[in-house]
Image (cartoon, rainbow, N blue to C red):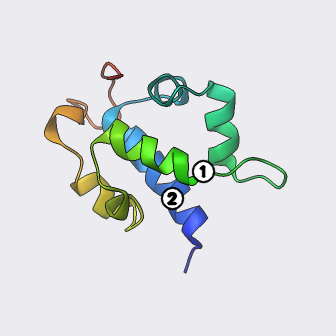
Amino acid sequence: MPSTEVNLRLTVAALMYATGETQTDLGRGLRLSQGQVSRKQSGAAGGSSWTLTDLDRLSAHYGIPVPDLLSGAEHAVSRLPARRRAATIGGTQLTTI
């Protein structure tokens, strides 16, 4: 069973895919640089992790309650509001700030 940290990284990747967002798009929405998002998503030793503040921002950005973000990628994507989904999975959409 993956750790909560790994689970959150997988969830964020799935949400980015479902909304058609890039790391740059997500960073813009969370007021982070693409590099910061990359480091949080990589989970590399010495890299930064998603913080509780980031979790609150992810929740607001995607319109999903925090507990749903922590319940796994499939669950989080199923809770994604229709307005946030890309027309085509993996497609693109404008980031809402």
Residues at circles 1 and 2 in contact by the CB criterion of under 8 Å? yes
Q: Nearer the viewer, residue 87 or 66?
A: 66
The residue depicted at 28 percent of the width and 38 percent of the height is: 89
The C terminus sits in image quarter: top left
| In-image side of 39 versus 9 (left or right) | right
Tell me residue 84's x, y (percent): 24, 34
Name which residue type carries label 2.
Answer: Leu
Which label's residue is closer to the chain start, 1 or 2?
2
Q: Secondary structure at mark 2?
A: helix
Quadrant of res 90: top left
Name the side, left or right, on which 63 lies relative to 7: left
The crowd level at tag 2 (other Cα within 10 Å; few <14, some 14-19, many 20+) is many
Q: Secondary structure at mark 1?
A: loop
Q: Where does the image place residue 14, in percent across and percent down from the top left?
A: 41, 49
Is residue 13 placed above or below 89 in the rendered structure?
Answer: below
Res. 2 mark: none
Instruction: Report, in whole angstroms, how far the alpha carbon at label 1 lies from the one at label 2.
Output: 8 Å
**Residue 43 coordinates in the image, percent (x, y):** 70, 53
**Rendered position, 90 above or below 47:** above
Q: Quadrant of residue 82?
A: top left
Report the mark closest to the observer, 1 or 2: 1
Seen as rendered, the residue at the extreme top is 94
According to the image, label 2 marks what residue? 8
Give the number of the disc on residue 50.
1
